[in-house]
Amino acid sequence: MQIFYNNITVLDIGVRRLEALRAKKVGTKIRVLQRDFLLPEFEERKEKKLKELSKKYAVDVEDLVIYSFPIENILFMNLNVPPKMDKRMIKNFALIEISRNLNLRPEEIVVDILEVFEGKALLVVSKREHIVQYVNKLVALGFYEPDILIPDVFKYLEFSNNTMGRKCLIIYNFFEDYYSIIFFIGSYVVAIRIVLSNLWDYMEMMRESIGIPPVDLVSLGNLKDLPEVEKFLLTNFEDILIELEREIKLTSETAISSVSIDEIDRFEFLVDPPVLSDVLNKALSGSSTFSSKDFEVIKPPESVETLGGLGLLLRGGRELGKVKSIHL
């Protein structure tokens, strides 16, 4: 019986990585008890490895179980909502309106409210069958049904700093070939845009040009002793940032409250794998668009190959109370 502590078990399955963790939360501290992390080459033995992990991470009935959910199965949608509706009424209203827009029956979709701001709702939408199939596949491999299923991008929000004013958070997820742009007004999320991008191709190009496999790069704590790698990646990040300015402007057009790039008080950047953080910081410092802005590249609390599992653990910890620290 978990009386003075709570166990949290998380599973983060991506296109090019697989991570499982079990941790214990005592008070405001989370300590990792077990961790398994597989890098890009795991895909060919994915199902076998998942079966092994399901036995290794057999959970106690009282564990809090959290899995990430693939971003390709999710839509973010805006909806004007009538005044004086509470969240339950908005959710029912949104379910009917969104099902009509997508030409689906209400029972075929799942709608959740991410934010309601100034008469507009920002919604997370998925087909029910996608969720059921995803969970059933994991259960068939021996895993428990999750208590919480989190859209992939949301696990990274756990690292963002709470700030006042207008903020733009940019998350580069090299493992999943997308980056996300998220607008905040204070604590309110007013826009999310997912941009598909062949980010991993830059890693493969590095293998061809310099001879360092992406797997080896991800495992490094930093690039201080590899100047040729840093130079190569810096050039490519500069190209990525040129595209980013255009995508931020497009994101502002989808916001549930008007926000332009010139009105943003602060930019936060996060990159997974975090070994690329310092290179991104250098690229931003030399960027004509961002060098004059208030920006920060967020770094993880400890040296890790990926931020995914830690983000899910932090989310689980918040479900159980305050979290002040996490230790691997």
Image: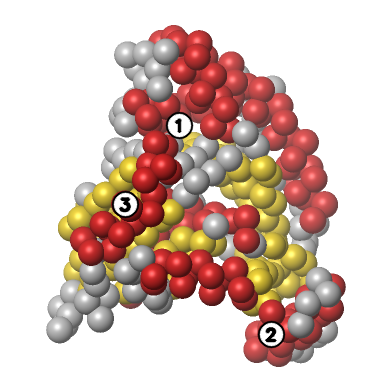
What colour scheme has been applied to the protein in the rendered image?
A: secondary structure
Earlier-in-chain disc, 1 versus 2 = 2
Name the amino acid type tagged 1: Ser
Residue 20 at what x, y percent from top left? Answer: 31, 55
Between circles 1 and 3, the one closer to the viewer is: 3
Is 59 left or right of 14, judged from the image as shown? left
Residue 127 at what x, y percent from top left? Answer: 66, 71
Earlier-in-chain disc, 2 versus 3 = 3
Q: Tell me the element at label 2.
A: helix
Is 154 left or right of 12, judged from the image as shown? right
Mark linked to residue 49: 3
* Label 1 – label 3 distance at C-alpha: 29 Å
Residue 3 at what x, y percent from top left? Answer: 16, 82
Q: Tell me the element at label 1.
A: helix
Between circles 1 and 2, the one closer to the viewer is: 2
Q: Which residue is painted at 58% across and 16% down in the image?
A: 235
Is residue 124 shown above or below 104?
Answer: above
* Label 1 – label 2 distance at C-alpha: 43 Å
* Label 2 – label 3 distance at C-alpha: 34 Å
Q: Which residue is painted at 58% across and 33% down in the image?
A: 199
Between circles 2 and 3, the one closer to the viewer is: 3
Residue 35 at what x, y percent from top left? Answer: 24, 52
The number of discs equals: 3
Q: Nearer the viewer, residue 56 or 228?
A: 56
Q: Which residue is painted at 25% across and 81% down in the image?
A: 61
> Disc 2 marks which residue?
107
> Disc 1 marks which residue?
277
